[in-house]
Image: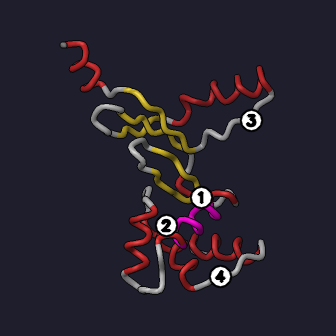
Amino acid sequence: MPHCHTLIEELRKQGYRLTPQREMIVEAIVHAGRHVTAEEVYEQVQSCTSAINVATVYRTLDLLVDLGLASRVDLGGQRAVYATVRHGPHVHLVCKRCGGIIEADHELISPLQEQLEELYGFVADLCHLAVPGLCAGCKSQSQEV
């Protein structure tokens, strides 16, 4: 079964109404194959139907996140992006100066996750994480000044 049908079936199983707009939003995020903004999803769906508004897109994306079917991460500068859980765990290193984004190895945060649970009994959801800082280029520019 294609991934979009899996998400749609999960919504149906949990008692949510499946409007054509909601199905198109799910299909748009799944078929993007990358992180997408709500506005990108809106543009994609709006190219198929005018019976959609951006609030519906945000509500549906928030529902998918709340149900654990998608993740949302803030990449700074009011840039929230969404991906389905199939996208897998990953870490974004976000440069505060130039806005560049580097995908980092998720295994780097495993020790942190383990220590948080061991020391505090806290189970952190670090599957989709953005870490602000300075990229190598911006760091070297700031050291030259």
Residue placed at 50% from the left, 67% from the top?
30
Marks 3 and 2 sit apart, C-alpha to C-alpha, by 27 Å
Residue 97: x and y, percent? 30, 31
Q: Which residue is mark 2?
A: 29
Mark 1 or mark 3: name the one nearer the start of the chain: 1
Q: In the visual, does 27 lie left or right of 14? A: left
Q: Residues within 10 Å of mark 2 (few under 14, many from 20)?
A: many
Residue 18 circle label: 4
Mark 4 or mark 1: name the one nearer the start of the chain: 4
- Secondary structure of the residue carrying tag 1 is strand
Say which amino acid is labelled 1.
Ala
- Secondary structure of the residue carrying tag 3 is loop
State yes or no: residue 98 in magenta: no
Q: Which residues are magenta?
A: 56-64
Q: In the visual, does 122 lie left or right of 86? A: right
Q: Are marks 2 and 1 in contact (CB under 8 Å)?
A: yes
Q: Which residue is mark 1?
A: 70
Q: Which residue is mark 3?
A: 123
- Secondary structure of the residue carrying tag 2 is helix
